[in-house]
Amino acid sequence: MVQKVYDVKGMTCDHCVQAVSSELNGLPGVGDVQVDLQSGKVTVTSDQPLDSAAVAAAVDEAGYELGGGESL
C-alpha cells in the first residue's frame, strides 16, 4: 500500500470534502481517501503509486486545485 498526502486548494465545506473524496475514490487502485478540511490536506491510500496527472484531473473535476504531494 502507498500513502500520499496532497494539498487541495479551495475546499471550504463538507460538500467540498465529499466532491474531492468521490472523484479520488474513483481512481483505479485507490482504497481510501481521508480529507482534512482545516489544513486542505488529502491523504490517498492506493495499491500502487498514482499518476500525478490522474490525481490532478480528479481534483479538477471536483472543482478544486491540486497543490503539491508528499509520499508517506
Image: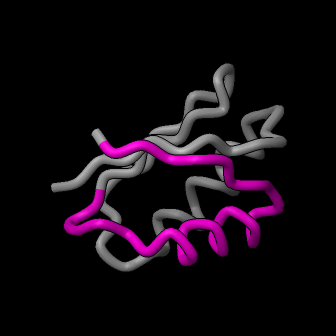
Which residue corresponds to the image point at 68% horizontal and 45% vertical from the top-left? Answer: 8
Q: Quadrant of residue 31?
A: bottom left
Q: Residue furthest left?
A: 1
Of residues 21 and 49, the one drawn nearer to the viewer in this rendering: 49
Which residue corresponds to the image point at 79% horizontal and 55% vertical from the top-left? Answer: 64
Of residues 13 and 53, the one drawn nearer to the viewer in this rendering: 53
Q: Specify the quadrant that holds the N terminus.
A: bottom left
Q: Specify the quadrant that holds the C terminus.
A: top left
| Residue 64 within the segment the image draws in magenta | yes
Q: In which quarter of the image is residue 20?
A: bottom right
Which residue corresponds to the image point at 58% horizontal and 62% vertical from the top-left? Answer: 22
Q: Where is residue 40 in the image (x, y as percent from the top left)?
A: 66, 32
Which residue corresponds to the image point at 49% horizontal and 73% vertical from the top-left? Answer: 26
Q: Position of residue 43 (x, y in %)?
A: 43, 42
| Residue 67 within the segment the image draws in magenta | yes
Looking at the image, residue 49 lies above or below residue 42: below
Q: Position of residue 2 (x, y in %)?
A: 23, 54
Of residues 4 and 13, the one drawn nearer to the viewer in this rendering: 4
Q: What coloring was used for the rendering? A: one colour
Q: Which stretch is magenta?
A: 46-71
Q: Is residue 36 left or right of residue 15?
A: left
Looking at the image, residue 63 lies above or below residue 70: below
Looking at the image, residue 36 lies above or below residue 26: above
Q: Is residue 25 left or right of residue 32?
A: right
